[in-house]
Amino acid sequence: QVQLQQWGAGLLKPSETLSLTCAVYGGSFSGYYWSWIRQPPGKGLEWIGEINHTGSTTYNPSLKSRVTISVDTSKNHFSLKLTSVTAADTAVYYCARGYCSSTTCYNLPEAVWGQGTTVTVSS
Amino acid sequence: EIVLTQSPATLSLSPGERATLSCRASQSVSSKLAWYQQKPGQAPRLLIYDASNRATGIPARFSGSGSGTDFTLTISSLEPEDFAVYSCQQRGNWPPSFGQGTKVDIK
């Protein structure tokens, strides 16, 4: 059964770069879409972006200028970088794997999630 | 970006009762609507995708319906473990977006 384990710095100062990594255990990287999603305190979820096993990425336009998602298939890892963070970036960040039906993995919601990483931006 | 509005914000029910949750999109998302369950301190759990399809391992008491802009999640008979926050997500228009959630709590 696939599991996602994520890690990264939990406390950042304004203008620093957020960096998180998500390791995939017990499953293949190929064929799936791999996402990052965040949840500010007391608020709803926000989709950040996704990458597939070939490295093709799609980002939320609201964050696109600051976000990079990359994949290292040799290590079964994928990563998130968010530059120039502010207090508004304070949130729990999740990595996730997209669902696959019997016919497709394309444009389906996230089904397997990491444990979440709390990131706080404060001076 | 598509705005998803969930109602009610809170639903107070007793175990065994039927829960009906609504998610309305600001424009059509076809059938690209998913439902999640989230408990405090936990990651979301996918329940329903493409409006009405249960994800693998999800009990039959969870069902979804709707298309276009109006969607419903129904829990036919609430079990104690079903008291949680439920969120909808659309993938009919880019970027994917989520509703603010409906909390189902014990009456």
Image (tube, helix red, strand yellow):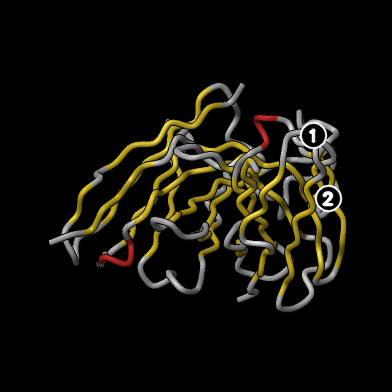
At x 63% / y 39%, what residue is drawn? B83
Element carrying mark 2 = strand
Q: Quadrant of residue B37?
A: top right
Question: Which residue is at 51% across, 24% downward?
Answer: A25
Q: Which quadrant of the structure image shows residue B105?
A: top right
Are discs 2 and 1 less than 8 Å apart at CB?
no
Q: Is residue B66 above or below residue B59?
A: below
**Residue name at image x 79 percent, y 53 percent:** B20
Quarter placement of the C terminus of chain B: top right
Q: Position of residue B81 (x, y in %)?
A: 65, 30
Place of residue B59 in the rendered image (x, y in percent of width and height, measured from the top left) = 80, 31
- Tell me the kind of residue under disc 2: Gly
**Callout 1: helix, strand or loop?**
loop
Tell me the residue that label 1 is attached to.
B16
Indicate the amino acid at tag 1. Gly
Q: Nearer the viewer, mark 2 or mark 1?
A: 1
Q: Nearer the viewer, residue B17 or B73?
A: B17
**Relative side of B65 to B45, left or right:** right
Sort mark 1 into few (<14), some (14-19) or many (20+) by Cα contacts within 10 Å. few
Of the pair B67 and A102, the residue shown nearer to us: B67
Residue marked by disc 2: B64
Residue B107 sits above or below residue A46 on the image: above
The disc numbered 1 marks a residue on which chain?
Answer: B
> Mark 2 belongs to which subunit?
B
Q: Residue at x 62, y 56 (%)?
A: B10
B26 is higher (above) or lower (below) than B67: below
Relative to residue B99, is residue A78 drawn left or right?
A: left
What percent of the width, then of the height, locates residue A107?
71, 55
State whether residue A32 appears in this view. no
